[in-house]
Image: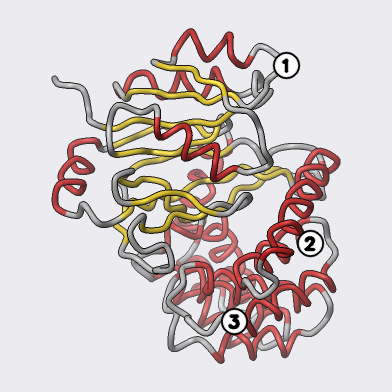
Amino acid sequence: MSKIPISVCIIAKNEEKYIEGCLQHLKPFGFEIIVTDTGSTDRTKEIAEKYADKVVDFEWIDDFAAARNFCAEHATNNWILALDCDEYMNTFDYKNIRILTQKLPRCVGRFPLKNLVMGNDGVQRYSVDDVTRFYNKKRFFWINPIHEQLVFIDDPTNITFPCFDMPTEIIHHGYNISGDEMAEKQLRNLRLLGKQLEKNPEDAYTWFQIGQSQFVLMNYDRAVSAYEMALSLESNAERYFVEILIESLSKAYLHVHREQDAVNVLLKYADKFKTAKYTYALAGAYYENHQTLQALMAFIKATSMKDRDTLGESLFVCYNNIIAIYREMGENEMADMYMDLYEKSRQERDRVLNS
């Protein structure tokens, strides 16, 4: 079989903990692998050279987009899959993805990234984020020093473009770290985001990402302020991060005991976003606002939607809450109806956490 015309591009610095596992998972798929090292002082380069087709050096300038673009320049193929060292690929349907690249050359590929996360309570969980990291380097390039984004080369101001969904499973291990390590990572992000904000103080995406970092740091009041600023600056609801922004703002409202505001902001945009994740966020807001019947209906709706698999561990939480609410209502037969689905979602959660 001929080599798949895809290059996997990875930027790395002091990643000896993860990079071997990442590259070992990639090798069976036959990709060209390019690793760009940004100044490692551990065994990262030594390990990369065992597996990668090319290992190139890039002087770190506090700019992830510049490093990703540099890495892609060294790739032989035009189609680029950008991964991080702490992301392990389990499956990749290369036949269907090759067809998609031929049919949709002006689109970018989006895949569900399953994030293993160590909670503040010491319990491991996982979430799912849709990330757009598969692209034709002749048409797209990266911008923004932190939380980099793809844009058209010939029209960088065009911030909306069509995506196709990639049949692949990739597990992200990098958030499965201690609270101190996560705090250090978020403080680094805030430093880079602050520089980005100095250049463009009215960039909604930057304010959104500041909110994300403040939320992880449990600075919920600051997160609310950043999210609200982002929402006030962004008028285009078609931008891919706006749905996540509203869901995140709702969760932040719950943490500062503004339960009705959490419900209201989700209802305001409910006609625009009809996804399982959005429905789940609304269910959670209803639940915390003691609107139990509305929460039950929303949890059930989320589990019945076509994209319910994007919920990750939240699908398990949905079934758990449905069962709990029905039992509180004395509807044990209805609760029992969901036990098999609950068990299947629990098994899937355990599979991902142990992968």
Q: Which mark is residue 214?
A: 2
259 or 150, which is in the foreground? Answer: 150
Image position of 257 (left or right of 339): right
Query: Under tag 2, what secondary structure?
Result: helix
Crowd rating for badge 3 (residues with CA inside 10 Å; few <14, some 14–19, many 20+)? many
Q: Quadrant of the N terminus?
A: top left
Q: Which image quadrant for residue 244?
A: bottom right
Give amino acid for label 3.
Ala
Give amino acid for label 1.
Thr
Rendered view: 41 above or below 280: above
Q: Looking at the picture, how far across and down is residue 137, in whole percent?
A: 33, 43
Q: Which image quadrant for residue 245?
A: bottom right
Which residue lies at the image location 80% right of the left edge and 72% below the top edge? 255
Q: State which tag comes first along the sequence, 2 or 1.
A: 1
Rendered view: 161 above or below 134: below
Query: Under tag 1, what secondary structure?
Result: loop
Depth-wise, is mark 3 or mark 1 nearer the camera? 1
Q: State which tag comes first along the sequence, 2 or 3.
A: 2
Q: Looking at the picture, how far across and down is residue 82, in whole percent?
A: 44, 39
Q: Looking at the picture, how far across and down is residue 118, in whole percent?
A: 72, 43
Rendered view: 184 above or below 228: above
Give amino acid for label 2.
Gln
Tell me the residue that label 3 is attached to: 295
Image position of 19 (left or right of 29): right
Image position of 96 (left or right of 27): left
Depth-wise, is mark 2 or mark 1 nearer the camera? 1
Q: Looking at the picture, how far across and down is residue 300, in whole percent?
A: 48, 75
263 or 345, which is in the foreground? Answer: 263
Q: Are marks 3 and 1 in contact (CB under 8 Å)?
A: no
How far apart, in angstroms, are the residues tagged by discs 2 and 3?
Answer: 27 Å
190 or 243, which is in the foreground? Answer: 190
Q: Which mark is residue 41?
A: 1
